[in-house]
Image: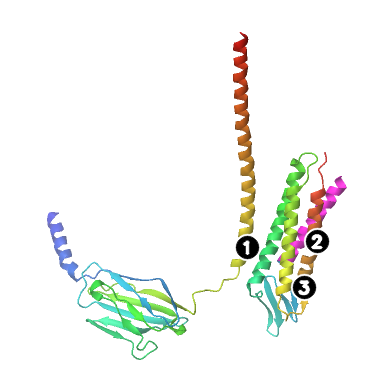
Amino acid sequence: MLRVLALASVVLLGIAPQASQAITVYTSWERHALVGSDVRLSCSFFSWRFVSEDVSFTWRYRPDGSRDSISIAHYAGGEAYTDNKGAFKDRVEFVGNPKRRDGSILIKNLDFSDNGTFTCDAKNPPDIVGRPSSVRLLVFETFLVPIQAGVITGAIIGVVLGLLVLIVVIYYLMRFLVARRVFSLNVSKHGKKKKEGSQQRQIKV
Amino acid sequence: MLCILLGVLALHLLVFILLIVSTASSQWSLEKEGHTDLWYNCHSDQNGYHCLQASTGDWIQAVQALMILAVVFCFVSLLAFAYQLFRLFKGGRFYFTSIFQILASVFVMCAAIIYTVMRPKSERDYGYSYVLAWVAFPLSLISGLIYLILRKKD
């Protein structure tokens, strides 16, 4: 039994250094930005190992409604490579600190055509098994979003009915409170009368 | 006494039905090949019969809200009438019922006025829902005032 355990532990120890473990990539869920502004898309990862020399980050962009994605930024072997041919030419900058597990990029001068999904894939060899994480970018003209249909309707109805309920509650509350005050006044009057009555009886006696 | 009671109740129910029909059916305006407002904008062309969301704008939502509130208040007034009929002391007036009914009439009036003023000029005619709303307004006002002067006997 002991021999089997020893053999198993040696085998596991022998295998473990070569086995790759899972890596978890984190990005934001959604980012909102104004036309013409810059946005920083953050990407981080969790891995059981220390950051290796061969750590790599890859950013891909998929426009809304399209099924294909193109690479726009890549960091590997200590060097950052950004898009110099496509729609993001000269607009993407790698601003992360890979030693600190940060693979963020900065996109400058946003336009409406930049609406889409940005996917970050991080690899920390030998931890390469992981699912890339996506962040959705929404570019607005202004941050005043037009009100959706039905919001005003619901708001008016809710406010009026709420006021109605409030008035009814206040009315019954006032009635209840006034009734209590009247009740306590009666008790004190009744008490005084009793005292006077007993004093008179004492005097008579 | 019973006749008056039944007549008042019948009037109240009529107002309620008018309000519901006016709110629910989408025929406040007639266009050249269809109708529009309060909820849908339906028209038929060579491709068939299409229905879209009603006129955009915040004013149409206010009209929707006011009509729904009028229906709600009319219904609450009906409930209050039933309650006060059995619980009111002798000689009392139907205050609750009348207040809610008058409020319902005010809401219908506001809705109809807002719709009349804010309607785009391009539309051609008014539909039957609009007419029903304007008919429901004085009827509900009269109904509310009757409740105000009605006294409970026995």
**Which amino acid type is marked by label 2?**
Pro
Q: Main secondary structure of the magenta part?
A: helix
Q: Which residue is mark 3?
A: B127
Numbered disc 3: what chain?
B
Residue beneath disc 1:
A156
Magenta segment: B1-23
Can residue A102 be seen here? The reply is yes
The CA span between labels 3 and 2 is 19 Å
Q: Residues within 10 Å of mark 1 (few under 14, many from 20)?
A: some
Q: Position of residue A177 (x, y in %)?
A: 61, 39
Q: Residues within 10 Å of mark 2 (few under 14, many from 20)?
A: some
- Disc number lying in front (1 or 3): 1
Task: Assign a secondary structure to mark 1.
Answer: helix
Of the two numbered discs 3 and 2 in the rendering, the one whose residue sits closer to the viewer: 2
Residue at which label 2 appears: B138
Whether B18 is among the magenta residues is: yes
The spot of residue B137 in percent (x, y) is 78, 62
Above/below status of A101 relative to A198: below
- Residue B120, image x and y in percent? 70, 78
Quote the CA–CA distance across marks 2 and 1: 23 Å
Question: Which image quarter holds the C terminus of chain A?
Answer: top right
Seen from the viewer's position, the closer of residues B90 and A9 is: B90
Rendered residue at 64%/69% (across/down): B61
Residue nearest the observer in this picture, B53 or B152 = B152
Q: How many marks?
A: 3
